[in-house]
């Protein structure tokens, strides 16, 4: 409750869970290449729902009983700074001599930013309880596990299957009729636009699947561990360096806080998994190793490093606000490095603003993983931290913002960290340091 002009205003929750559930399903289960044609690359169903989330959140602020502007939230502040930086880059784009195709790109980029902003705001403020938060995360894990099963089938059959999906009003921006290959092995894409996006998506959701597998003890072992198995089985089939690098980051974040038993079992599972790959798919393990040992002769890696000099030239031309978000089109050059892409399109200001969002989320989730009184919440915070960290590192290996599933889950995780922080704080706004506050005591195991 808040007292305004002598009147006590009772805040009512936004109850945005239904919209967010629909968003998760649309993001993971609908092929990310399907979009509303008039909106172009910014017109996937999930991104449109993100814009609706922004409208919902801002409309709620007009009603004092729903307003959530106070107290201030670090994640909300950081995200608002990011959006402001993107607006500055948009103004920098339209003020310079610019072609029409770049104006369209800048407009699409602005829609994307609004969608991500709305997703963070509504996730952070629109979930009425920890039970809703964990239910939504569990749904994300289940949907990703379904995508993992699809990836295994795609690898075994060399058939995409998603090209047979037809949704009225949506058109595909790329051909999904086949499965890509690397060194003679099929690369499973799942419902993603590319195996790289698919692999990074699986890597980001894996720590959340592990969280529920370890801590949802009221559910059967099959229910808890099947998503982990499906995601882990599909991950190597993407044959993506970005995914393997992200997996290393996930393990680096989770391993220090796991119990001795969890560490032993994780090492056993990794060893058994590698042996299974070696026996079931001869030659794949060697191919996976060559992704890193033979990187100096790999055309994919060389195309990235060869772009660095060109990127520096563009950064030097407009170092402050860049040339405009989403105006450096793929037809010019594919940089395959989102951090460099941000420096080119949004300048130092935009890249630092995104870094602030990432660091703020990592710091907040790190604090929650140490300070929360409930082990379930500490584990959940650490899993979200691993998801954001793996995505941030993967941004250095491909243009993540050009892939809706990875960008969507990244900002969704940022919003979930804000939601967990909001539900875990005491009424006076101080971090929990002792016994669980009332909201935690009411729902000990979501």
Image: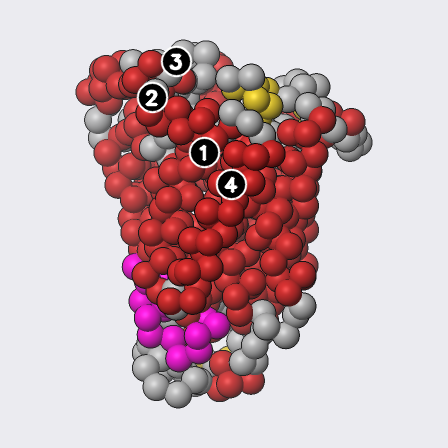
Residue 206 point in image, percent of width and height:
51, 50
Q: Secondary structure at mark 1?
A: helix
Magenta residues, start to end? 363-377
- Name above or below for residue 267 compared with residue 432: above
- Name above or below for residue 99 compared with residue 103: above
Q: Secondary structure at mark 4?
A: helix
* In front: label 1 or label 4: 4
Q: Residue 299, labelled with which disc? A: 3
Marks 1 and 2, how far apart at CA: 24 Å
Question: Does the magenta portion include 404?
Answer: no
Marks 1 and 4, how far apart at CA: 35 Å
- Say which residue appears at 42% left-offset and 37% top-offset: 244
Marks 3 and 1, how far apart at CA: 22 Å
Kindly report the secondary structure that dominates the magenta region of the rendered protein. Answer: helix
Give the mark nearer the N terminus: 1 vs 4. Answer: 4
Q: Residue 295, labelled with which disc? A: 2
Bin the neighbour count of mark 1 within 10 Å (Cα to Cα): few under 14, some 14-19, many 20 and up.
Answer: many
- Say which residue appears at 40% left-offset and 60% top-offset: 263
Give the mark nearer the N terminus: 1 vs 2. Answer: 2
Give the mark nearer the N terminus: 2 vs 4. Answer: 4
Residue receiving disc 4: 275
* In front: label 3 or label 4: 4
- The answer to the question of whether label 3 and label 2 lie on touching residues, with beta carbons closer than 8 A, is no
Residue 264 point in image, percent of width and height:
41, 60
* In front: label 2 or label 4: 4
Residue receiving disc 1: 401
Marks 3 and 2, how far apart at CA: 8 Å
Bin the neighbour count of mark 3 within 10 Å (Cα to Cα): few under 14, some 14-19, many 20 and up.
Answer: few
- Say which residue appears at 64% left-offset and 22% top-offset: 179
């Amino acid at each position: 409750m808040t007292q305004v002009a002598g009147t006590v205003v009772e805040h009512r929750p936004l109850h945005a869970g239904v919209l967010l559930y629909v968003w998760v399903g649309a993001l993971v289960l609908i092929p990310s290449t399907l979009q509303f044609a008039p909106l172009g690359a910014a017109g996937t169903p999930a991104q449109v729902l993100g814009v609706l989330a922004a409208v919902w959140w801002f409309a709620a602020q007009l009603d004092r009983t729903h307003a959530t502007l106070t107290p201030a939230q670090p994640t909300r502040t950081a995200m608002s700074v990011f959006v402001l930086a993107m607006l500055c880059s948009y103004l920098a784009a339209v003020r310079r001599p610019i072609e029409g195709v770049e104006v369209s790109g800048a407009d699409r980029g602005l829609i994307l930013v609004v969608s991500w902003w709305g997703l963070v705001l509504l996730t952070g403020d629109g979930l009425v309880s920890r039970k809703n938060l964990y239910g939504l995360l569990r749904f994300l894990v289940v949907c990703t596990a379904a995508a993992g099963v699809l990836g295994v089938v795609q690898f075994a059959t060399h058939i995409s299957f998603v090209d047979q999906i037809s949704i009225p009003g949506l058109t595909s921006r790329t051909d999904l009729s086949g499965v890509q290959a690397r060194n003679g092995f099929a690369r499973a894409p799942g419902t993603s636009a590319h195996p790289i996006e698919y692999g990074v998506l699986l890597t980001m959701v894996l720590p959340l699947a592990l969280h529920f597998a370890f801590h949802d003890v009221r559910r059967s072992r099959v229910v808890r561990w099947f998503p982990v198995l499906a995601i882990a089985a599909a991950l190597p089939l993407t044959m993506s360096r970005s995914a393997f690098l992200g997996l290393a980051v996930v393990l680096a974040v989770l391993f220090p806080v796991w119990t001795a038993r969890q560490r032993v079992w994780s090492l056993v599972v990794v060893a058994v998994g590698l042996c299974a790959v070696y026996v079931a798919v001869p030659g794949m393990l060697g191919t996976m190793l060559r992704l890193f040992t033979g990187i100096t002769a790999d055309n994919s890696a060389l195309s990235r490093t060869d772009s660095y000099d060109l990127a520096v030239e563009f950064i030097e031309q407009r170092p402050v606000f860049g040339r405009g978000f989403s105006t450096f089109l793929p037809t010019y050059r594919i940089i395959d490095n989102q951090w460099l892409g941000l420096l080119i399109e949004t300048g130092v200001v935009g890249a630092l603003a995104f870094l602030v969002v990432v660091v703020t989320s990592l710091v907040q989730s790190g604090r929650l993983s140490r300070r929360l009184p409930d082990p379930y919440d500490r584990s959940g915070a650490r899993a979200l931290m691993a998801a954001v960290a793996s995505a941030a590192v993967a941004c250095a290996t491909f243009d993540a913002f050009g892939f809706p599933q990875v960008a969507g889950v990244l900002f969704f995780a940022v919003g979930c960290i804000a939601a967990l922080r909001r539900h875990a704080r005491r009424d006076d706004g101080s971090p929990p340091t002792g016994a669980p506050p009332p909201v935690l005591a009411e729902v000990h195991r979501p």
